[in-house]
Amino acid sequence: MEVKFSMRLLINSSKVCKGICLAWVILIELFLLNQCNLTKLNNSCDPTNSSYFETLALKIAANDTSPFCGTRLVPNNLVISEYSIPSLGLKGFISNNSIVLAGDNITTLGDYVAVFTTNAVKITVNNVVQVSGATSNSYATPMKYVLEGSDGQTKIYDVQLVAPKLLGSGSLRLWLSADNLQLNDGDGVSSWNDISGFSNSIGMATVSQQPIFRANTLNGLPTLAFFNASDTRLIRNSGAVGLYVVNSGSFFAVLKITGTDALGTSLFNIHGQNGREFSLTHPGGVFLQCRNNQACHPISNQSAITGNFFSIGSIQNSNLIIREYRNGTLVGEDTTPVNLFDFSGGTDIGLFFISNGNLDMELSEILFFNNLISEEEIQKVFFYLNTKYKLI
């Protein structure tokens, strides 16, 4: 800084060269200032450096995923865009970092070869490199696909093959899925075929009371729309097989509730006399477990997620406890007097229905097991439903 002041004094003493020398003084001052801050100016990660923002903008514009100043500017874009097991005729549903396959004809889980499409340069499962259409893996347990990009980025996909017929010691007795219906958008649904293997299909002959098939509603998949105003319902008056066996039972559904009724809103009912029922309060839509002709009890006391699709599960362990799940998370349990949950006195008349006509909703899928399934199996069902319909 002494150089700067001495030069200023020299300039002030000579008016002739003052204008010319002033420019040199400024240049020299900048030079000296730069020398004092050389480390700072050479640091491209310093936000006060103009090159920092130039580099930042260029990397984002170029979709450059390589690290910049210790941070990735562009989110990890490694994906598996398609996944299938051709030998089983199954195509995987992909949601975020999850892939699930499920089939109604799967009676055992073995080793299969998957075909997949990805932009990763390398994929491994348990450190074994995966080759689409060639590598065989065991699907008896969930797998983690580790994707690796050319820049060293990694991403993990959770992959599961879920076989509902194998869960709960083979106790699946009802499986209704809207994507199994071959209908056009706006068609009335006169019959909904059961794919559990027990032929517990359900329907409605009265056209005005039939639910409406809505295509491409939830993650590209269809739903059935029910309306309170038209008394929409589906019913099977007799002949259903195996829905009423013991006190234990496991019920799952994917639906969107838009309205209930003060007269009472039943979602799903198995048999009339002393049978099991799942209903909703009005207007909050709290989920209830009921014994017909007896009483109903809330499990979690949580209102329904009105206006949004969600998955729900009600799991009853004998007549000891009932648990309620939302999107796979346990939200409540009830140990109300055991006689309320004792269905052993009922008569198996083969009757069940979906909605008592007092419900406005869209319904995608229902699974009912006539026995208790384990926590691990519960999460398998939710993994299937949540991934298939992109609920989480």
Image (tube, grey):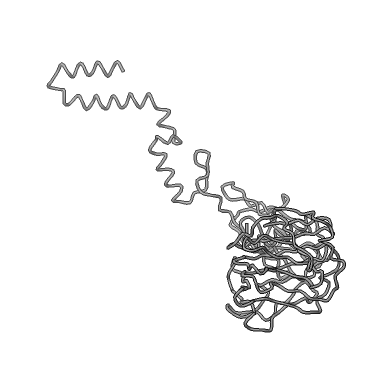
Quarter residue 225 falls in? bottom right
Residue 392 left/right relative to 203: left
Q: Quadrant of the C terminus?
A: bottom right
Residue lying at 70% horizontally and 55% vertically, measured from the top left: 300
Residue 306 left/right relative to 102: left
Q: Quadrant of the N terminus?
A: top left
The furthest residue to the left = 16
* Residue 379 horizontal/vertical position (percent): 73, 56
* Residue 391 horizontal/vertical position (percent): 62, 59
Residue lying at 87% horizontally and 68% vertically, measured from the top left: 345
Q: Nearer the viewer, residue 134 or 57?
A: 57
Residue lying at 68% horizontally and 64% vertically, measured from the top left: 280
> Is 314 located above or below residue 54 in the figure?
below
Give the total of numbered labels. 0
The furthest residue to the right = 345
* Residue 296 horizontal/vertical position (percent): 75, 62
Q: Nearer the viewer, residue 79 or 216?
A: 216
Residue 372 left/right relative to 259: right
Q: Nearer the viewer, residue 259 or 69?
A: 259
* Residue 261 horizontal/vertical position (percent): 63, 68
Quarter residue 327 falls in? bottom right
> Is 259 located above or below residue 31 in the figure?
below
